[in-house]
Amino acid sequence: MPIPTNPTPTRKTDRYRGRDGARTGPAVASTGPGAGESSLRMTAVTPSADPAVAVEVLAAARSVTVLCHIQPDADTLGSGLALAQVLHRRGIPVQVSFAEPDELPASMRSLPGAEHLVPPAQVAAQVDLLVTVDCGSAGRLGALADRLDGAQTVLVIDHHRSNTRFGTVNLIDDTADSTTSVLTRVFDAWGADIDRDIAHCLFAGLVTDTGCFRWGGAASHLLADRLLATGIDGAGITRTLMDTHPFGWLSMLSRVLGSARLEPAAAHGAGLVYAFVHSADADGLRSEEVESVIDVVRTTAEADVAAVFKQSRTEPQRWMVSLRSRDSGVGTGDAVDVARVATRLGGGGHRYAAGYTTHGTSDDLVAALLAELAADGTN
């Protein structure tokens, strides 16, 4: 059911609008948004700022839409559902959605708050406040990016360094290991109770984006301890999200790993291992099974950079590319910055994990990636 909107609200968040209705803010405007984005977006919250401005915007909202990125993982969906529960408990109408795929990934169906999810077609065209979670750019919203123009205020909550600051208010902390970590700070500033259901969602995002805490910092371990203290089943959540696949995944993995290739000289000697997942390979499997392939490919000892090219099921020339990197040794800190590489190829992400979408033949895709790795100069 579409949530109610108020086309002419008078509220505290009006300070983010000018007389002509254009979005404004208390800080310097960011420039150069991507195609389809507003020419005026303001950065009201910086990575080191207190999340009080985000709390103010949320508390003043009369209706809220929360959008997750396409092909959602547990960080974006866990963030969205945790926020929806907090808003609902405060009596604020809320809906959560993502543009694709057309169903909730099976591994995330146990996340509390799923009753707030609505299909993309039911997302309100106009809303008081639109919040994006874990979206580095408007393009990550897919077909739902058009809902940005119908929102009185856009709040972006994210932890990607490459975030384009496309909101009215942007809470971006690129030192955080997950967006759920950033959101926890918002809840604390708002005085929201983090009970077992909300902790479940927050932990799901944390364990996913830290790779089961393989690359999480001290803050993530402290947050995990706090969330586990609510009584959630951390092992069960992790197993469901990270270590459970249908039998068909094994045969798909066999075919895909058979296509793997090693380029030892790539990235100035760091090495690149890559594989292709063609749409036929994934026939009958969910998108989350395809997304998991990178976690196998990246274990190759002879390469510090890994890539998986995933073919679109609807556009054969369209490919989604996952990138991963690692340090050459313990404590060396010399990993290739794949976020920088992905950004130049039209995507974004983090130093150790990034991605982008591209078009072309398999040979063209590999050549383009090798060229960017050679030009990057990071090893």
Image: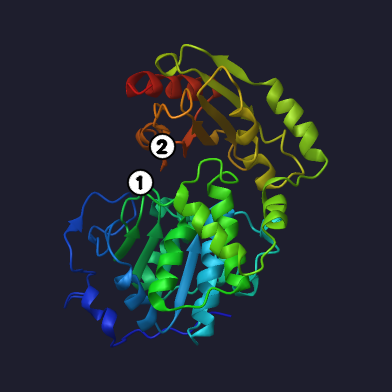
Q: Residue type at mark 1?
A: Arg
- Residue at 32% x, 49% y: name it: 34
Q: How is the image coloured?
A: rainbow
| Circle 1 residues within 10 Å: few <14, some 14–19, many ≥20 | some
Query: Considering only vertical position in the picture, is 215 above or below 185?
Result: above
The answer to whether residue 99 is visible is: no
x and y, in percent, of residue 256 in the image = 69, 27
Query: Considering only vertical position in the picture, is 278 above or below 284?
Result: above
- Residue at 43% x, 23% y: name it: 368
x and y, in percent, of residue 206 in the image = 54, 54
- Residue at 50% x, 22% y: name it: 366
Which residue is denoted by mark 1 in the rendering? Answer: 161
Q: Which mark is residue 348?
A: none
Q: Mark 2 and mark 1: span between their CA atoms?
A: 9 Å
Q: Quadrant of the N terminus?
A: bottom right
Closest to the observer: 306 or 8? 306
Q: Quadrant of the C terminus?
A: top left
Closest to the observer: 270 or 258? 270
Instruction: Say if mark 2 contacts mark 1, CB within 8 Å.
Output: yes
Q: Residue type at mark 2?
A: Arg
Q: Which mark is residue 351?
A: 2
